[in-house]
Amino acid sequence: MTCQKIFSIVLCFFLATCCNAQTPQISKVSYVDTLFENASPLWYEVDANGTLQVYLTYDHERNSPNRAAGHVHFCVHGDAGKNLRIEFNNLNNVWNGTPGSVAKELLSVAISEDGKEWRSFPLNPTADGRVFGEFLLKSDRLFVARVEPYRLSDLDRMLNRLRGHPDVSIDLIGQTVEGRILEIIRLGNERSRDHVFLRARAHPWEAGGNWVVEGVVDRMLANDKDGARFREKLCIHVLPMANKDGVARGRTRFNSQGKDLNRNWDKPANSELAPENAALEKWIEKKIADGHPPDIALELHNDGNGKLHISRPLEGDTTNYLERMELFESLLRRHTWFSEGATKPNFRNPGSLGEGWMERFRIDAIVHEFNCNLIASTGQRPLAMHWKEYGSQLPIVFEEYFKLREH
């Protein structure tokens, strides 16, 4: 045998060894677990190529063609050190009566080996309206979520650490369809002239708003001179989790009676179908009667765009309101990583909390979306720490907003 042949054989053996070392085998999926808090209802199968095909389950709106399947939260059990391909199906939704697809917005997921420490991971579209990701299993299980999860137990932990704080009150305002208690947290000085309202989690999958709330709470209660000043100058009321039933059951959009809690605010709430909104409506009416309504209200959401939905009701002069919102947007750009801007002047979302509170209660109200895939100004894929950072910057935005809007 010539030296050249021997060299060729050795080279082929070396390359094959390297390729096998660099390309882990396909993991065999043993089980997909959805029996834990906030897990998404789904069904699955493993196809002939070893790909895990995940089929999300729709939730539907009452008396409407609207349907939604966008909540992702499950745990895959497989072989550590091997590759896994996951494809997501059932992504064709209906929003405001118009067909669409979550595939256009499901561009990344958060993944974790233990369900506690999360990192972002990109997904890719297929030609037929699905999306997929290829993962290396570092252990024998992998948690996958659309957004880093925030569960009822996370909220309970926050509420427990707030109880008894001298600058905090927690008011019980009502119950959900299934009887879960709804709380409003008051941060700061109730006698302040400047009042803010925040609501998160009207749509169950949109956990980013809860992390923003955590950031606001931590900044307001910080033991430093800025925290003390914020608590003296501001009164911030927060409804931290509007759709507790949906969060508990892993739904995407609607409450347990099939109602969208960010709709129908243009008329009195139905206490049977949407007791969550009816409870909040009674609270806001009492605040108005007491002479302390919010000066500005933010409805916190996640989507794939991350814009401010400025309210534009059909009736009434909104010139001064739009000027105030231009000021507010400029302060967000100055003090936070927000850069996506506001919706176009012809954009309307009738019945949302933003437009409904403007029309009925004359409260400056905005629907604030957070892009679940990308922070446009930094290029980062957002996790809980990024949204908490954003929330920590909101008190200075509010403080300057109230100071500058008087001039």
Image: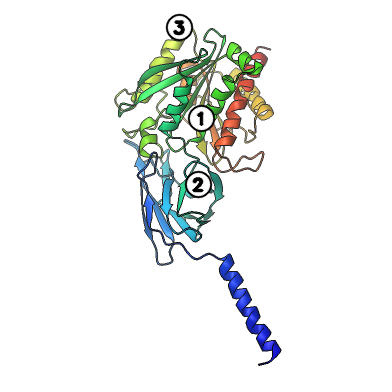
Mark in front: 3 vs 2: 2
Instruction: Say whether disc 2 or disc 1 marks the residue closer to the N-terminus.
Output: 2
Give yes or no for contact between labels 3 and 1 (Cβ–Cβ under 8 Å): no
Q: Can residue 200 be seen at all in this image of the molecule?
A: yes
Snapshot quadrant of residue 278: top left
| Residue 231 pos. (x, y %) | 58, 14
Instruction: Say whether disc 3 or disc 2 marks the residue closer to the N-terminus.
Output: 2
Mark in front: 2 vs 1: 2
Snapshot quadrant of residue 183: top left
Q: CA distance from mark 3 to mark 2?
A: 47 Å
- Residue beneath disc 3: 290
| Residue 379 pos. (x, y %) | 65, 43
Residue 300: mark: 1
| Residue 175 pos. (x, y %) | 34, 23
- Quadrant of the snapshot with the C terminus: top right
Name the amino acid type tagged 2: Ser
> Dot 3 surroundings within 10 Å: few (below 14), some, or many (20 or more)?
few
- Residue beneath disc 2: 112
